[in-house]
């Protein structure tokens, strides 16, 4: 089956069936938690997930007390995006968390609010296959979101999008208050051209160090080599931090890489991330998980985006090593503006990925870069590069001062503990006045105004065209 037209060529693994969304009852309010890290947009289901859910839709709600709780803390600005189970809104924090250290930073109090409808999350179920039938429900999407929240609460790293708070109304609405990355995705996929397009705002360029006098750029829609190298080093830091804490991202790609304030690259979207909560004896040690060929962290289901999956993903495979493959595909895209393996049909795509031939790297690439990409995209997972290999590779450390090279190559990450108790209590609730309602009403009014403007503009165009169509023939007849 050709999936390119449906998924713009990148084949996000997600199955869903639509049914009307239930109206949202007026919520009690709820808030909570310390900072940590995750994402904006929508959670993804694995290939065994069956979704019986409709698209998230804001229901009409009656305004309630304003200026208290949630509505008194955040001001709605605009909608950033909408998915099957969540909507993301840009808001401004009205009261700074650190009033003693006010700055002139225009992004200082902006946050991204990701709202879930819990009724839809409960309907998305993952089944375990036994023989030829999928007979047992393993978990729901709500369970996965709880694990995601537990992970984000605990983790804190400059190269991961952080979680500021969780708001839960106890019945229908779940809201994640996330760090806002003002410069967005580094690249987006152009389904028509079947290539990537850089998305960096020119304003962010002032935050990057000056490049060489004659920068190397391998493709017009790729980044200059020195910028791609800088992004890559930060991705290595963020991904290794996750692996140190027994977490695999499983969907690393340019669309899930955001640029925050001051040009810092941040990994986002932990919707299919996997936390391996086996005992310490069963898990590789933090450093061993990153610097050796891990024999742990195996999964039997595939998740994420097909074009970023390694050749071994059709059998039980190490999700840790698979993340390294995705890191290699991401670097390839950053540099050349395209994917190393791409076909509109998923079967053809996997035939290409599983071919014994090494990845084709453009001849214009330097010897060191070709060696790095072929090491990251090594078809044999037991021979694929590790974080230790990456950190000592000459292309990666090129341009760094001697002391910076030493710091980069010896960097260690603190491990945090995520327990079953953390997962069970990921959604903390406190009693308060109803506060989410006001934000939903404001958001709905904004959406209605935007839709009305579009309708008015379209109606105006149609009216003008209609008048032309009516008048012109008459005028022509009169002239004749």
Image (cartoon, rainbow, N blue to C red):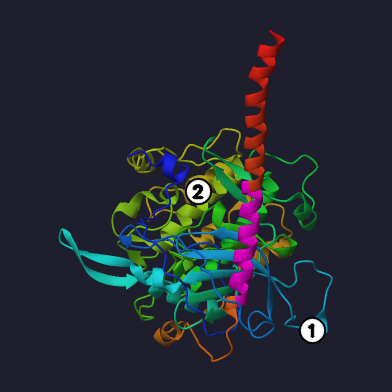
Question: Which residue occupies the extreme right position in the image?
Answer: 104
Q: Which residues are drawn in magenta?
A: 438-455
Residue 250 percent across, percent down from the top left: 44, 60
**116 relative to 251, above or below:** below
Residue 41 percent across, percent down from the top left: 53, 62
Give the position of the C terminus as an image quadrant. Answer: top right
Discs 1/2, front: 1
Q: Residues within 10 Å of mark 1 (few under 14, many from 20)?
A: few
Which residue is rendered at x = 63% and y = 42% of the image? Answer: 459
Given residues 467 and 273, the one toward you in this image is 467
Which residue is rendered at x = 56% and y = 52% of the image? Answer: 254
Image quadrant assignment for residue 438: bottom right
**In 3D space, how far apart are the residues under numbered discs 1 and 2 (Cα atoms)?**
43 Å
Which residue is rendered at x = 53% and y = 90% of the image? Answer: 430
Given residues 198 and 45, the one toward you in this image is 45
Q: Which residue is mark 2?
A: 329
Residue 453 percent across, percent down from the top left: 66, 51
Question: Which residue occupies the extreme top position in the image?
Answer: 480
Q: Which callout, 1 or 2, points at the residue further toward the start of the chain? A: 1
């Amino acid at each position: 089956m050709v999936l390119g037209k449906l998924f713009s060529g990148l084949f996000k693994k997600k199955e869903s069936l639509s049914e009307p969304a239930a109206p949202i009852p007026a919520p009690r309010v709820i808030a909570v938690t310390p900072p940590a890290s995750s994402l904006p947009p929508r959670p993804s289901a694995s290939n065994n997930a069956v979704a019986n859910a409709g698209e998230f839709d804001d229901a009409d709600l009656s305004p309630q007390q304003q200026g208290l709780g949630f509505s008194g803390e955040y001001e709605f600005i605009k909608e950033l995006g909408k998915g099957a189970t969540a909507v993301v809104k840009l808001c401004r924090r009205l009261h700074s968390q650190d009033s003693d250290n006010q700055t002139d930073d225009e992004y200082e109090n902006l946050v991204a609010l990701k709202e879930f409808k819990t009724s839809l999350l409960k309907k998305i179920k993952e089944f375990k296959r036994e023989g030829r039938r999928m007979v047992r429900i393993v978990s729901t999407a709500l369970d996965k979101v709880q694990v995601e929240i537990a992970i984000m609460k605990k983790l804190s790293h400059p190269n991961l999008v952080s979680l500021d708070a969780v708001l839960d109304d106890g019945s229908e609405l779940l809201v994640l208050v996330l760090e806002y990355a003002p410069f967005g995705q580094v690249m987006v996929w152009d389904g028509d051209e079947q290539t990537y397009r850089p998305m960096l705002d020119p304003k962010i360029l002032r935050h990057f160090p000056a490049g060489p006098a004659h920068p190397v750029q391998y493709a017009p829609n790729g980044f200059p080599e020195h910028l791609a190298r800088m992004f890559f080093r930060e991705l290595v830091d963020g991904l290794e931090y996750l692996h140190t804490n027994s977490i695999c991202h499983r969907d690393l790609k340019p669309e899930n890489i955001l640029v925050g304030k001051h040009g810092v690259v941040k990994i986002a979207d932990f919707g299919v991330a996997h936390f391996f909560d086996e005992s310490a004896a069963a898990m590789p040690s933090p450093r061993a998980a990153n610097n050796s060929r891990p024999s742990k962290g195996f999964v039997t289901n595939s998740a994420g985006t097909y074009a970023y999956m390694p050749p071994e993903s059709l059998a039980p495979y190490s999700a840790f090593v698979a993340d390294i493959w995705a890191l290699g595909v991401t670097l390839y895209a950053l540099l050349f503006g395209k994917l190393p393996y791409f076909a509109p049909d998923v079967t053809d795509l996997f035939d290409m990925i599983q071919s014994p031939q090494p990845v084709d790297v453009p001849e214009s690439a330097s010897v060191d870069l070709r060696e790095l990409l072929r090491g990251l995209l090594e078809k044999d997972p037991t021979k694929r590069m590790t974080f230790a290999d990456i950190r000592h590779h000459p292309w990666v450390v090129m341009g760094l001062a001697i002391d910076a090279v030493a710091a980069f190559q010896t960097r260690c990450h603190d491990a945090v503990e995520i327990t079953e108790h953390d997962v069970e209590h990921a959604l903390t609730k406190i009693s308060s006045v109803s506060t989410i309602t006001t934000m939903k009403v404001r958001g709905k009014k904004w959406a209605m105004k935007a839709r009305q403007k579009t309708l008015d503009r379209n109606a105006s165009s149609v009216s003008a065209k209609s008048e032309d169509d009516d008048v012109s023939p008459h005028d022509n007849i009169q002239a004749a």
